[in-house]
Image (cartoon, rainbow, N blue to C red):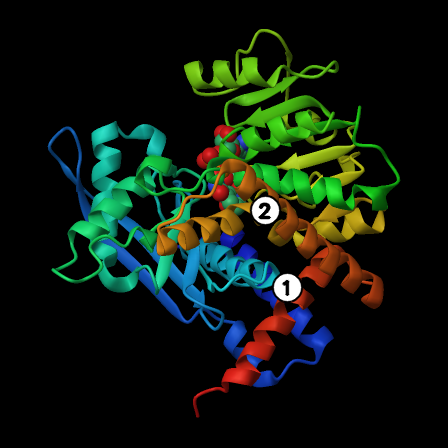
Amino acid sequence: METSTTTARLYEEATAHVEQAAIALDMDPKVRRILSAPKTELIINFPVLRDDGEYEILQGYRIQHNNVLGPYKGGMRFHPAVDLDEVRALATWMTFKCALMQLPFGGAKGGVAIDPHTLSDGELERVVRRFTHALGDNIGPEFDIPAPDAGSDARMMGWMMDTYLNSRGPGERQNDRRVVTGKPVELGGSAGREEATGRGAAYALRHLYGEFDRSLDGGTTAIQGFGNVGTHAAYALHELGMKVVAIADVTGVVYDAKGLDIEKLDAHRTASGGVADYIDADALTSDEFFALDVDVLVPAALESQITARNVDSVRAHVILEAANGPVTTEAAAVLEHGGVHVIPDILANAGGVVVSYYEWVQNKTSDRWSATDVGVRLRNSIWGAADRVAARREERGCTRRQAAYMEAAELLERAYSLRGIFP
Ligand code: NAD
């Protein structure tokens, strides 16, 4: 079990968000203690057969933070830097995201410390299936429901679902596809799930933009991350009339002051594996990317990207946190002090779990909702939460992040007070 100082700090920040909300709400100390630590932590070492005939032992995690509002819910990350503290932080944020969105779910997160891009298709499938098998009954349609996160996708969720369902005995929910969300549509996935997180971020931005005294139409944006979230955010922000002037991913940064052609860049990324070497734009360094003079900066890659090291160079007017935890607490304080608006992750990227909930409901009722229906419901859900955050912020004179945590924490405390805590 290894954790790095970076992820240890990340988990400290996640618990500090909870603590701050608890203090502001004068929360019952018993509930505060419960919310300050995950309920269950699983570390699973499992063997995987590589194509060269060798076995490798991989480490996987599932952290179930809280389930007072409903089954545990949260993504599975496949990335070499995954460790216990990172997953603890991500699981904590899921509890508060689900509560903020008033979903009947708790919070969890999991992952495997591996770079999926270094594996063949066969190796990747074996990793997913062995990990799912090792998780056994620690996941389930009414207990803990995984979904995609960084480094995982719909195809991997299909393998996860298949492995789980195939290991059920007769009469044991062999067809309960709710066990995983973010599946391919053909396997019971929801229309609109793939694009939900990026689109949801754009809905949040559009709804709150009136507060920022600027017009979205003709505004500029720069997006870090061109995976699931970043790509769909780019399309959605472009549809709102914004010029996407820069996109960064792990391979490099591309920039065009006139606005990038998202479709062309998307095709280039699909063909070559990243944005690097795209010929219709200039290349920038990562430091130049964060210093761009844009209206909206969208970190949609990984956590801890805007830190004490680079925050002073940020010139954007709004930070839309499409990734989880992309701005450290120290950097956020500098931004807020400088009048930069931060739309916090538990609101900005909640679209994914909201549509995962829609998928779960559709599977439960054997129903199918259209993409339009899903889109309208998602928009209303994000707008509702954005209104609650705005009202709380107005009432308390606090940051949007603090307001979002207070909204969520109040519901969680209320649930404990109504259910009671087992003596
Ligand atoms: P992804 O794996 O599909 O894409 C990640 C992107 O980030 C890739 O383009 C990658 O090249 C880029 N990236 C990675 N490291 C980078 C670096 N150091 N510098 C620049 N770019 C880098 O992942 P995703 O599903 O799009 O998730 C992105 C973020 O959004 C994560 O924080 C994730 O937790 C969060 N999120 C995802 C979902 C979802 O539905 N997938 C939902 C909510 C939140």
Q: Which mark, residue 17?
A: 1
SS assignment at label 1: helix
Residue at 61% in and 61% down: 100
Label 1 crowd bin: few (<14), some (14–19), many (20+), radius 10 Å: many
Quarter of the figure that contains the N terminus? bottom left
Q: Say what secondary structure mark 2 lies in.
A: helix
- Residue at 55% over, 55% down: 10
Work out whether 378 lies above or below 245.
Answer: below
The amino acid type of the residue labelled 1 equals His
Q: Which tag is nearer the camera, tag 2 or tag 1?
A: 2
Q: Where, by quadrant of the figure, is residue 238 drawn? A: top right
Residue 358 % position (x, y) = 47, 50
> Residue 173, how many percent across, how many down?
22, 59
Residue 190, quarter of picture: top left
Q: Quadrant of the C terminus?
A: bottom left
The amino acid beneath tag 2 is Leu
Tell me which numbered mark, 2 or 1, is placed earlier along the sequence: 1
